[in-house]
Image (spheres, rainbow, N blue to C red):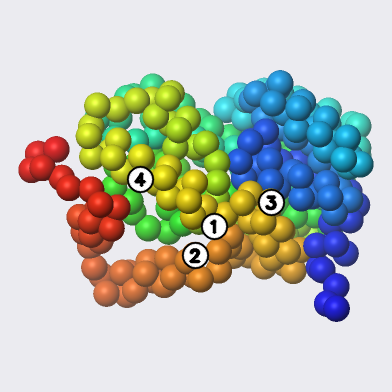
Amino acid sequence: MQTSSARERFSRGVAVVTGAAAGIGEGLARHLSSLGMTVVVSDIDGDRAAKVADEIVAAGGKAEPYAVDVADPDAVEVMASEIFDRHGSVELLVNNAGIESSGLLWEIDRERWQRLMQINVDGVFYCLRSFVPRMIAAGTPSCIANLSSVGGLNAVAVQSPYIVSKHAVLAMTECLHQDLAIVGAPIQVSAVIPHSIRSEIFLSAQREAPTDNPTANAVFAAMQRDNVEKGLDPLVAAEHMIEQIARGEFWVHSDDDLCIAAMHRRGQQLLDLAPPADPHAMLTRMGITVEHGA
């Protein structure tokens, strides 16, 4: 029987997972704890983070909650300082915290756009700025995994803020890989490209930033339906992705076939100098009919 790379590499040490109180982040936190890591369950929702951490401990794992808004650079700096003071090192940093938003680009609420970028993009930067210098100083082999998305590879209609943010995270991750190579730090970098993993991200977006656009609402309803019916279980996805990270891979997928197909589509589009795909094809697949001007 083949030995799991993850069970060898992540059987000890400290993992910090942002946005770890639900969805993908919770799946990653629970799986990492099952491998033997001490997991810092970091989330803006302190009560849910505490619940997840308590359940991990009750199951025999090691976890501690940390309530933080990653969009607050000072709070992130305090978090990094306290974690390193307590543990001395961080072997795995997973920047997962993120939110969604729907609507036509020019109809997006300005405050929602800013909030999404602060969490999805600035939050990753703030974590890197606070954790990377400490990880370098610790000098121990470690890893940083940033959560982009298949939406970070291609354009998708009626969710422009999220798509823009995930393209930015992917670019930031590639730049981080190069910058760490310049200084010779023993830190692996991985770009995580999830496909559909069961979560409440679409429901949260519609609840927190509702739109009057019927097409956007229909698309998000269809994505939520597909997420429930076809999305991967967060624990199953986490096991698959952590195994790839443990093997040292830069590109990490939740669903190899679907994610690689998305990468090939993007590559072919660039090779052909083609415009973005016609969104009506996506809408047809979802069973959505758009009236002219809708």
Tell whether 84 sits left or right of 165. right
- Which residue corresponds to the image point at 29% horizontal and 47% vertical from the top-left? 157
Give the distance between the C-alpha atoms of the residues marked 2 and 1, in whole angstroms. Answer: 7 Å
Q: Are marks 1 and 4 in contact (CB under 8 Å)?
A: no
**Residue matched to label 4:** 222
N-terminal-most mark, 2 or 1: 1
Say few, some or many: other residues with alpha carbon within 10 Å of mark 3 (under 14 / 14 to 19 / 20 or more).
many
**Residue matched to label 1:** 193
Q: Is residue 158 above or below residue 115?
A: below
Q: Are marks 2 and 4 in contact (CB under 8 Å)?
A: no
Indicate which label's residue lies in the foreground, 2 or 4.
4
**Residue matched to label 3:** 235
Tell whether 166 sits left or right of 186. left
SS for callout 2: helix
**Residue matched to label 2:** 259
N-terminal-most mark, 1 or 3: 1
Quarter where residue 122 is shown: top right
Residue at the far front in the pictured view: 229
Work out whether residue 7 or residue 245 is closer to the camera in this orientation and state it: 7
